[in-house]
Each structure stands twice: as C-alpha cells, then as structure tokens.
Image (spheres, rainbow, N blue to C red):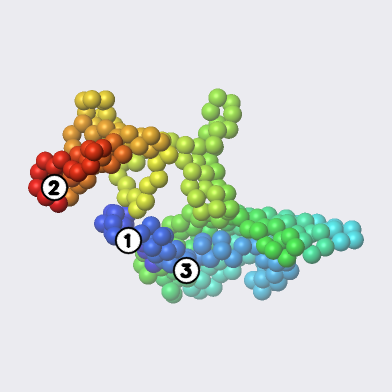
Amino acid sequence: MPLRSSTEFVDHYNSLPGDILEEIDKKINDTEAIKQLKKGIDSSTEAILENAKGLNGNTQYFMRQNGKMKAEIVRVDNYVVTETKALAESIHQVRATADKSWAAAQNSLQAKYDMKKGEASATWTSLVKIVYDGVSYDAGMVIGAELKNGKVSTQIGFSAQTFIVYNPANGKMEPVFAIRNGQVFLRTIFIDKGTIEELLIGSVIQSKNYQAGDTGFKIDGETGIAEFNRLLINKDFKIMGDASKIVLDNTGLAVYPASGGVIKLGRRP
C-alpha cells in the first residue's frame, strides 16, 4: 500500500511525530522487505536447507565441530517457475555456535513475480544476530521494491541499537549523524521548513539576520538574556524586574517602593 506524499504529511501539523511514525510503520509493515528485516535470521541452518529442498534448490553446506563449538557455512540458490509465478533467491549464511549461544551473518537476494495476482517484489537483505544467555540481539538492513494493487513502492530499512554515519575527512572518520536507542544526534543540520513539538535549547538560538542592536533576535538559553530588535505583542503580557519590584503588563506599569504601597501608571488591574 503506497504511503501518502511528503506534502500530505506536511499538511498534518496537528499530528505528533510519534503518530506519523506509527502510520508509516503500519503502512510498510506488510511489505516483503520489512517482513524480512523484522523476521531476522532463523534459529538454525536446518530451516534454510529444508526450505531449499521444497523448492528443489541448489545447496552447499559446510560444517566443522569440536565439542560444544561449531562453525557452519550455508549457500542456497532457489529458483522456481510456473505458468504464472517466478521466484529466484540466493542466500549465504555463516554461523558460529558455542553450546547454546551463537552468532550469525546472512546476505540474501530475492526476486519474485506473481502474474495472476499482479504482485512482485525484489529485496536485498543483510542481517546479523547474536543469541547470548537466551536473549537475541539483531541488526540488519534491507532494500526493497514491491508491486501491489497496481502501484509500486520502494523501501530502505535499518534495524540496530546504534546507527552512525561517518565523514572520512582529512584522513579520519568523523561521526556526523547517529541514532542511538531511538534518539537522533546531528553535528550540523540545515532545515528549510520544520515543525517541532518541543524544543530544548542548550546554548543560543538566533535569527539568521541577527545584528546586535539592529536586526533579528537572539535568545541565550544559559543566561536567559533575550534581544528582539522589533517586537510586537498582542493581548496579555507581563514583564517583571528588579526582584519583582517593577511590573509591566497589559494594565500598565507598577512600581513597588521599599517603603510600601504601589505607584501605578495605567489602569487598575
């Protein structure tokens, strides 16, 4: 099922980012590419070999074992053709086992077409997995294209606790973009248009045309000092200074002397 266009998403400013992410996930969750990414690597090589038998595929299996230690390599090529269906896939997996724990890496290519249903898909999947103390740890990436309901959609998916992009500048690998445990970290970013539900400023936010005492604005998040070179306020406002002894709001200016009482310019509150 195709996603809405990016411009359609921009029009939904009232939707929270979490809601939009859930909608995207729901729409691509049924694609062949994302299914393979979420499925991950099978718990044993036997599953790959048994599936190849059912498809009359070509298989290569290499294994050496020493006590509780085992090393395996599996290569499978499956290709099936009927009057209305065609399937071609190639799987290459390596696996190292230590008693009940194991580590595996797998690359697979798959293309299939069902002419009767009018459906097709092509995927490239690269997966890794470690099972340690009964707990599975997966990472992978997938590239997919799918024809369904007369429309073609494409996907690229990643699954990992940490995702990072490096810039190999000046002979060193400089991290420029990372995702860790669901949080995104960017060293430098340029955004044409953006919608932000909540913003936490660690240092300074200012306009591109800011010139002290002349144009633009600047807010220092550490000192609380703000400068607006042109400011228009509608309806209610309140400014408090000198330990709350001077108050300026929409009713006027109030000064509270040390001797008590109040000096008010404007209307009564």
Residue at the spot of label 1:
15
Mark 2 or 1, closer to the camera = 2
**Residue 192, percent from left and from top:** 31, 41
Secondary element under disc 3, as helix, strand or loop, is: loop
Task: Measure how far apart labels 3 and 2 are at the Cα level.
Answer: 60 Å
Q: In terms of depth relative to the viewer, which is nearer, 229 or 106?
A: 229
**Residue 117, percent from left and from top:** 43, 74
Disc 2 marks a residue whose amino acid type is Thr
Mark 3 or 2, closer to the camera = 2
User: Residue at horizontal 31%, vertical 39%?
Assistant: 243
Using residue 253 as the reference point, say whether residue 80 is left or right of it. Answer: right
Q: Earlier in the sequence, mark 2 or mark 1?
A: 1
Secondary element under disc 1, as helix, strand or loop, is: loop
Q: Residues within 10 Å of mark 3 (few under 14, many from 20)?
A: few
Residue at the spot of label 3:
30
Q: Residues within 10 Å of mark 2 (few under 14, many from 20)?
A: some
Does residue 18 lie above or below 183 as drawn? below
User: Residue at horizontal 50%, vertical 50%?
Assistant: 183
**Is residue 253 among the parts visible in the rendering?**
no
Figure disc tally: 3
Residue at the spot of label 2:
251
**Is residue 96 among the parts visible in the rendering?**
yes
Disc 1 marks a residue whose amino acid type is Ser
Mark 1 or 3, closer to the camera = 1
